[in-house]
Amino acid sequence: RPKVAIVIVNYNGRSLLERYLSSVESLEYSNYEIILVDNDSDDSSVKYVRDYHPSVNIVESENNRGFSRGNNLGAASAEDADYYWFL
């Protein structure tokens, strides 16, 4: 099974992440990693993900790089991915 890197870019979206990550983690496909790129949120998004979704790889940006640059950051941090799924 090919490995899929699921890249999620976030900026102050904690309330969305609470529902969204649980849904992504319930995939039946098993060979994936979730990468959350946080664009310098100030709504405790990163703390929430660390506390409740410890398997998610978090990449913290020092500033808001926007959606495209955030995706590039996430793709660069993926480990041995065969495919990338940008959400």
Image (spheres, helix red, strand yellow):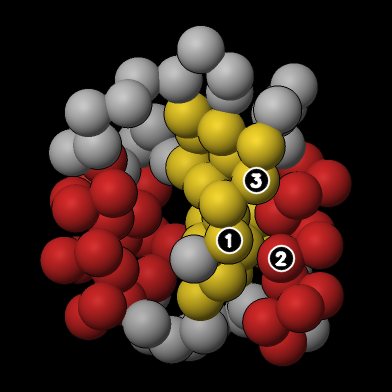
Query: How far is mark 1 from mark 3, CA to CA?
Result: 6 Å
> Which disc number belongs to residue 84?
3
Label 1, on which residue? 86
Q: Amino acid at mark 1?
A: Phe
Q: Which sits earlier in the primary sequence, circle 2 or circle 1? A: 2
Front residue (pair 50, 5): 5
Residue 58, given in percent of the width and then of the height, sits at 56, 50
Do we see residue 51 in this rendering? no
Up/down of 64 relative to 82, above or below:
below
- Asked if the residue at tag 3 contacts the one at tag 1, i.e. Cβ–Cβ closer than 8 Å, the answer is yes
- Judged left or right of residue 12, residue 51 is left
Label 2, on which residue? 71
Which secondary structure, mark 1? strand
- Asked if the residue at tag 1 contacts the one at tag 2, i.e. Cβ–Cβ closer than 8 Å, the answer is yes
Up/down of 15 relative to 73, above or below:
below
Packing grade of label 1 (10 A; few <14, some 14-19, many >=20) is some
Query: How far is mark 2 from mark 1, CA to CA?
Result: 7 Å
For marks 2 and 3, give the one nearer the viewer. Answer: 3
